[in-house]
Amino acid sequence: MAVNQGQPLAKITLQRSLGVAADGVIGPVTLAVANRMGDDHSALLMTARAFRYLQTQNSGAGGSSVCS
């Protein structure tokens, strides 16, 4: 999702996926939660968030939905 959208959005997306305050600062809280999660779990959360993002971008724009 955050590819070509810059580091600020990538940081916030990561934080939202981890369930921590999405302030865009990768500090000790974000790192601690990220380190407690396994790679598979982190990848699943990011993929789910990207999928939801794509659904919202494609719905209502006159185009077909990702889920149709």
Image (cartoon, rainbow, N blue to C red):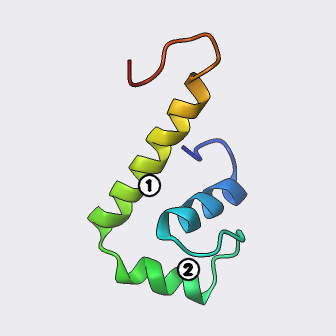
- Locate the C terminus and report the quarter of the image it occupies: top left
Q: Nearer the viewer, residue 18 or 28?
A: 18
Q: Give the image location of residue 17, x and y in percent.
A: 49, 62
- Amino acid at the residue labelled 1: Met
- Residue located 59% across and 47% down the image: 2
- Amino acid at the residue labelled 2: Thr
- Mark 1 Cα within 10 Å, few/some/many (few <14, many 20+)? some
Sequence-earlier tag: 2 or 1: 2
* Image disc number at residue 38: none
Numbered marks: total: 2
55 above or below 61?
Answer: below
- Residue named by callout 2: 30
Locate residue 62 relative to residue 19 in the image: left or right.
Answer: right
Q: How far apart are marks 2 and 1 (CA)?
A: 14 Å
- Residue named by callout 1: 46
- Residue located 27% across and 63% down the image: 40
50 above or below 58?
Answer: below
- Residue located 49% across and 41% down the image: 52
Q: What element carries label 2?
A: helix
Locate residue 5 relative to residue 35 in the image: left or right.
Answer: right
Task: Name which quarter of the figure residue 13 lies in.
Answer: bottom right
Q: Give the image location of residue 27, x and y in percent.
A: 63, 84
- Locate the N terminus and report the quarter of the image it occupies: top right
Q: Is mark 1 on a helix, strand or loop?
A: helix
- Residue located 33% across and 55% down the image: 44
18 above or below 54?
Answer: below
Q: Which residue lies furthest to the front in this view?
A: 60
